[in-house]
Amino acid sequence: MSDVSARDQGRDKARDNARDGAMSMAAMSSERIEPDDNVWTRRLVLFLRIMAVVSIMKGLYHWAQVTGFIGGEEEAFENQSMAWQTATVYFAVIELVGAVGLWLATPWGAVVWLTTVVSMAVIELMFPGIYGGSLTVVGFEAVMLAAYLALAWMAARERPP
């Protein structure tokens, strides 16, 4: 009985040494072994983080308008129309909330961000009196929305059903 257990221990020790040697060789290897299984998911997360930074900048810009850090006396928050004030406060809050969700790559963050994108496009197109109806802003929002949808589609195709 002791012969069998000694042989098993010897085999286990040899297997452990081989595994340790293989791990140390992989660690010393100059090439980094990285699976390409989730390349689109990583790209989507990178895109979400970039959009989070953009959302933070936009949210802080709206807060700067509300607090009066930017603009002159005639462009003060109090001197603007009620529609402009409402839209500015809405975007000041929702952009920062969406930025947190985007940075964390949560589903609710993407939903809040999509809400801000669609809201800004609707305000620019349907209510040009509020922010001026800039087609550049609408184009930028449309490109970002299309990029998100394409990346989300490709990331979803990576995962098995």
Image (tube, grey):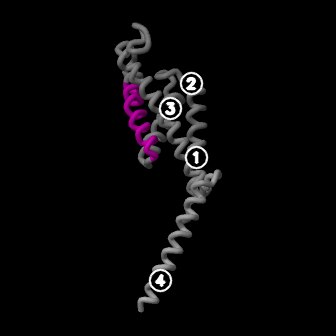
Q: CA distance from mark 4 to mark 1?
A: 47 Å
Range of residues picked out in magenta:
86-105
Direction from residue 19 to residue 99 in the image, left or right: left
Q: Earlier in the sequence, mark 2 or mark 3?
A: 3
Numbered label attached to residue 54:
3
- Point 60% across, 54% down: residue: 28
Q: Secondary structure at mark 4?
A: helix
Direction from residue 118 to residue 66 in the image, left or right: left
| Residue 59 image position (x, y, % from top left) | 43, 28
- Amino acid on which disc 1 is placed: Arg
- Point 49% across, 27% down: residue: 127
Q: CA distance from mark 4 to mark 2?
A: 76 Å
Q: Secondary structure at mark 2?
A: loop
Question: Given this view, does label 4 or label 1 mark the residue nearer the observer?
Answer: 4
- Point 57% across, 53% down: residue: 155
Q: Inspect the magenta stretch and tell me whether residue 99 lies in it.
A: yes
- Amino acid on which disc 2 is placed: Ser
Q: CA distance from mark 1 to mark 2?
A: 29 Å
Q: Quadrant of residue 19?
A: bottom right
Q: CA distance from mark 1 to mark 3?
A: 17 Å
Q: CA distance from mark 4 to mark 3?
A: 60 Å
